[in-house]
Amino acid sequence: MAAFRGSMKKLIIAVLMLLAMPACALAQDDKGGNAITFSTGIDYSSGRYGQPQSTDIVVGLSNVALTTGDFRFSASLPYLSIVGPPYVVIGPDGGLVLVTQKGAAKSTARDGWGDLNLGTTYTWQPDGYEIDFTGNAKIATADASKGLSTGENDISFSADVSRQFGSWSPFVTFGYLIPGSPKAYSLNSAPQFSVGTSVQITDDIVGTASYDFNGAITPTLSDAQQLFAAGSWLFTDSLSFTVYAEYGLAAGAPNQGTGLLISWKLPV
């Protein structure tokens, strides 16, 4: 299974988890076969991020992924609806960048398409372990003037290591985010880390829990630490549902969040 990448949009994380469920949950798939997965979902998060006002974000996601042999290629494009202070900007990891701290600035509402995300994952399975090496590129397609993007392209890398012990699959993720360089403010590269486990509850249901750490890419925001829990139900051989929730442990993370994802997998 693929470990969570805490720095990426939560819905993209959930999509990748579904694409790489433990083999016992996806016994219907031909090992090493090719498949295309279409996913859609909705995500809600709310947090103050150390500010006097809350920022509420609703994300609608469309994602497509191609799995062929040991490789997985994915593309996703979110639709964002944000209510919060005007100085809040969506950063390269899908989290927030507080460009300036202007106190009790009046909240604004804005919406529109977010940035295009492209990812490639290679899976290696040595001696009972599963290791995913992932590279992700965020293409700045969103409207930066509305705070939907930093307006710059960004890249990130991660390595996910997991091993299955009966119905349990503990995992750990190490990543690094390299944001672009906007003209109006500076962003710093930052590490990412996750640790957790998945458990096969029934033949069709998988639960996952993790602790996620995302280093701050701007001095106006603290590191993000949060707890994440998800449950995935393999409704049919090709149709899956995932629900998840998160709880922030630090000012750089949302206070709480939740979401729903539907994924449809087709052999090709």
Image: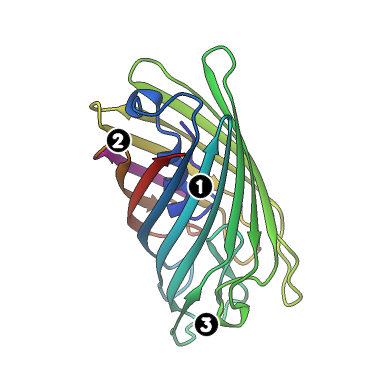
Q: Residues within 10 Å of mark 1 (few under 14, many from 20)?
A: many
Image position of 53 (left or right of 243): right
Q: Is residue 236 visible?
A: yes
Discs 2, 1 touching: Cβ within 8 Å: no
Label 2 vs label 1: CA separation?
17 Å
Tell me, yes or no, whether the highlighted magenta stretch contains residue 266.
Answer: no
> Residue shown at 46%/23% (left/top)?
31
Q: Secondary structure at mark 2?
A: loop
Q: Select label 1 or label 3 by which is in front.
A: 1
- Image check: 198 left or right of 185? left
Q: How is the image coloured?
A: rainbow
Q: Residue 17: image x %, image y %?
A: 43, 40
Q: Which residues are magenta?
A: 225-235
Residue behind mark 3: 86
Position above or below: 162 against 88: above
Label 1 or label 3, whichever comes before in sequence order: 1
Residue plotted at (53% across, 52% down): 8
Residue type, numbered disc 1: Ala
Residue occupied by mark 2 = 237
Q: Amino acid at mark 3?
A: Pro
Q: Report whether 150 appears left or right of 245.
A: right
Front residue of 164 and 76: 76
Q: Which mark is residue 65?
A: 1
Q: What residue do we see at 50% from left, 47% from top?
A: 65
Distance from Cα at disc 3 to Cα at disc 2: 45 Å
